[in-house]
Amino acid sequence: MDINILVVAVAVLAFGLFAGRLRGTPLTAPMVFTAAGLLLGQSVLGILDVGVDSGFVSSLAETALVVVLFTDASRMDLRTVAREHSLALRLLLIGLPLAIAVGALAGSLLLPTLSLAAVGLLAVTLAPTDAALGQAFVNNESVPQRIRQTLNVESGLNDGLAVPFLTVLLDIGLHQADSPWRYALLLAQLVGIGVGVGLAVGWLGGRLLTWSASRDWATGSTQRLGTLALPAIAYAASSLLGGNGFVASFVAGLAVGTAARSLLKGTTAFAEAEGQLLTLLTFLLFGSVIAGQLLSGLSWQVIVYALVSLLLVRPVAVALSLLGSGVAPSTTAFIGWAGPRGLASIVYAVVIAESGVPGAQLVFLAAAWTILLSIVLHGVTSAPISNLYGRRIGQRRGDGAPEHRTVQHLPVRLPPFDHVSHGGRPGTTTRGAPRREPTT
């Protein structure tokens, strides 16, 4: 364990020292940390000794997800989302279930040895998106603001909305003979308790923190610490009461973001620093964990499924969910591609691998290949595809196109480091020039 901690710490230090040299390259932080994990893992240098069933890996991944669920959700004001972000709502309420259904269908055809519950788990794992892996999709100002915000809102909410599907399918996979009524009751219990605890903790905690600050009882730093205690309280309390801790953390973030917007500065600052550190460490350990497994049990069906998930499943779900919205075909194609798989997918894959569900290792392998390909393909293509789409859709600016409708800005999660890709997108600079950060 000591050598693992030492190696991880040195990797973070090295990245902190040399990240600026990556400016002007298509490399992203998740690409760098995943590659470092692959290199340091057992199949190459053999320095990092961690497995998918390691308590350290699962604890770190779950902690990172709790933090990201809370901080991402806290960026969203549900009143604004409901009032102005109709495209994002289509992607969340129609596109997400469709992505799970189409992904499960593809899994049934390509991976016939898996049960229906297992292919469903695989589809749920790969349904959430992580905009932080393709920052140009949400930062490139040649892309209409409404489309960037659509991707931002979708990415901030879909990982939390996928949790109930994951929970129920895990139980179905472990108890195949149980009745549908039991699963309905389980869903009501896990989600109901999680939602109730999350609302109570987020709303009451947010109100208490703003009340305390208004009377100068709290300092800026202690208010930030108190805010960051909320997801931990929600997670632990929900788990103790028999609910789902991830749901509770997510809902607590929504409650804070809607009822206590003054706390947003603290959650955003944490997401930019400590939260990003947890995320990058998860990618490092993900690379190390999969280093010895990528070729074990590999088949052409796994690779084809990974490609189908990236190139077909999400685009089909997006196209169907945007029918009747009036957006251009190029917009549908852009949104269909702009869906990197990231942190949530990694954590869900680890949870499944540890669950004991029949076929869990094959599910983990297929998910790992999909995530790995997404890290590379979305990281490399985000800037040029955003530039290409921005030029094309810009030609419709004067004809009342729905893409150019102005919507209220909701903060985006900043990239893990000053990622600058080719193409001169806003927020990019040459070396040494100040970088323009997204407005929060």
Image (cartoon, grey):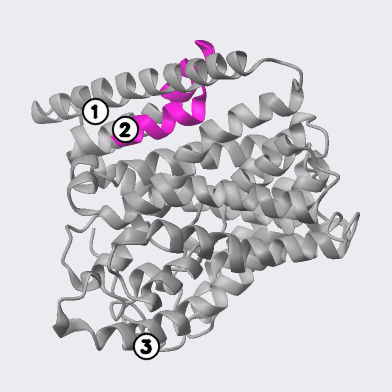
| For marks 3 and 1 on the same chain, the one whose residue lies earlier in the sequence | 1
Kindly tell me whether residue 341 is visible in this rendering.
yes
Q: Position of residue 304 (x, y in %)?
A: 76, 65
The residue stretch that appears in magenta:
232-254
Q: Could you give the CA–CA distance between mark 3 and mark 1, rounded to whole angstroms? A: 40 Å
Q: Relative to the observer, which residue lies in front, 136 or 210?
A: 136
**Total count of labels:** 3
Amino acid under disc 3: Gly
Tell me which amino acid carries mark 2: Thr
Task: Kindly indicate the quadrant of the structure image that contains residue 69.
Answer: top left
Q: Tell whether 221 sits left or right of 50.
A: left
Identified at 76% across, 33% down, the residue is 354
Residue 88 image position (x, y, % from top left): 33, 54
Give the CA separation, mark 2 to mark 1.
7 Å
- Residue 225 location, x and y as percent? 34, 33
Residue 227 marker: 2
